[in-house]
Image: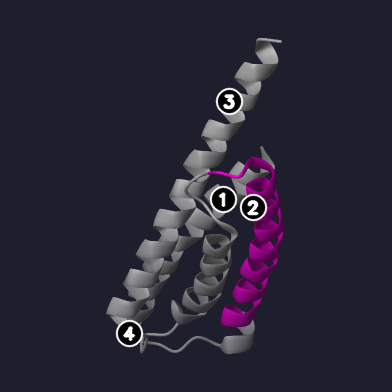
Amino acid sequence: MLLIQQTSILIDECEKSVARFWQMREEDRTPDFFKEVKPHADAIHHHLKEWQQGANLWIQNNNPKYMHIQQIAAVVESMEQFVVQSFFKETSKKRFLDAIHSTSFTLKNFERIVKEGTKDVIQKENHQ
């Protein structure tokens, strides 16, 4: 399912953002904004918007108990910030890591809920 794949890519981007954050601190350099930061941020922004549309539609159609459209919006907002921040060594470590932890938790929870919902649909179809 496309939504699960998109969610998995975002979970992976959380991990890559942490790795990039530590790498930039280790290299002690400032990236070229227009060559490194902006192209990557634009690609993630595009992916986030597509994912958000699919996730919101899935929530509206399935009405999961512990996942809401507001959480999806929070993931998008947070990721748009920390993906850019991951390039800069001056970024506050605690706030950055807390944002990624929270976002990753929500994404993994959403992925699990969608997978469970997909299994339920397949089981219902097989019993008909």
Q: Nearer the viewer, residue 61 or 76?
A: 61
Percent of width and height locating residue 39: 65, 76
Between 109 and 40, the one nearer to me in the picture: 109
- What is the spatial separation of the Cα atoms under label 4 and label 2, in whole angstroms? 30 Å
- The range drawn in magenta is 36-64
Q: Cβ–Cβ below 8 Å for labels 2 and 1?
A: yes
Position of 92 with respect to 86 (left or right) is: left
Q: Position of residue 86 (x, y in %)?
A: 44, 76
Q: Is residue 73 above or below residue 109?
A: below
Camera-near label (2 vs 1) is 2
Q: Which mark is residue 7?
A: 1
Vertical placement of 107 versus 121: above or below? below
Q: Disc 3 versus disc 4: distance between alpha carbons?
A: 42 Å
Q: Measured from the top left, where is residue 40 in percent x and y?
A: 61, 72
Question: Regarding mark 4 in the picture, which secondary structure is present there?
Answer: loop
Question: Which residue is labeled 3 in the image?
Answer: 120
Residue 23 visible, this angle: no
Read off the residue under disc 4.
Answer: 92
Q: Amino acid at mark 3?
A: Asp
Q: Which residue is mark 2?
A: 55
Mark 2 crowdedness (10 Å alpha carbons): few <14, some 14-19, many ≥20 = many
